[in-house]
Amino acid sequence: MLKNRYYVMRHGESSANASGIIASDPLTAKRKFGLTKQGKRQVLNTVTASFKSYAFDRIYTSDFLRARETAEIAAECFGIRSVIYTSLLRERFFGTLDGEKDSEYQKAWELDESGMGLDCYGIETPDEVLDRLLSLIRECEKKHTGETILLVSHGDPLQIILAAFEGIGPRNHRSVAHLNIGEIRELVPHENFTLEEDI
């Protein structure tokens, strides 16, 4: 049993989304590809509509610009004084597909299901993504008790952690309903879910 409740939020529309490109390289995504005006409105609309439904104690976010901006808007609306930035919530690294058209995501997802070929493109595997997200949750479980924590991240990482909580292997993360831009969803652990390490 977890000591805290966890919610995830996908960042609002970024300039990379609007341009239809993959932006997963920390060297650029930490300082570029922030939220569009539409993205800021999406986040504000989501948190305003959710204000009476959620009471978060703290927010952890990817250190990519689009996620940071999303988390900062959410923090202001929810009355949280500071946001915790972490590389553990970063976008999945798509290797040589970075900078390509976002239609290339499909190539990575097909390789996920086959279990082969990701290394040809230098793509971070679903297992690697899951390991870093679970390590953050383990860290939170050690530091906090009885809190409601919001994790702000990106499409693939959030779909992978949602799959894990639902008892689905990371390679099959695409079978989980994806998060819409700016959407908030609770992580509800399946009866067989485990963090796989002593907390």
Image: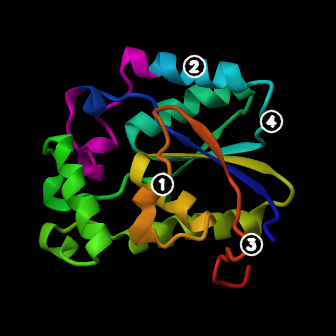
Residue under pointer 3? 191
> Quick one: SS at disc 2?
helix
Split into 4 quadrants, where in the image is the N terminus?
bottom right
Amino acid type indicated by mark 2: Leu
Residue 158 image offset from top left, x and y in percent: 50, 53
Amino acid type indicated by mark 1: Gln
- Residue drawn at x 51%, y 31% as measured from the top left: 182
- Residue drawn at x 79%, y 60% as measured from the top left: 144
Amino acid type indicated by mark 3: Glu
> Quick one: SS at disc 1?
helix
Disc on the earlier residue, 1 or 2: 2
Residue 55, label in figure: 4
Mark 1 and mark 2 residues within 8 Å of each other at the beta carbon: no
Cα gap from disc 2 to disc 3, whole angstroms: 34 Å
> Quick one: SS at disc 4?
loop
Q: Which residues are magenta?
A: 19-39
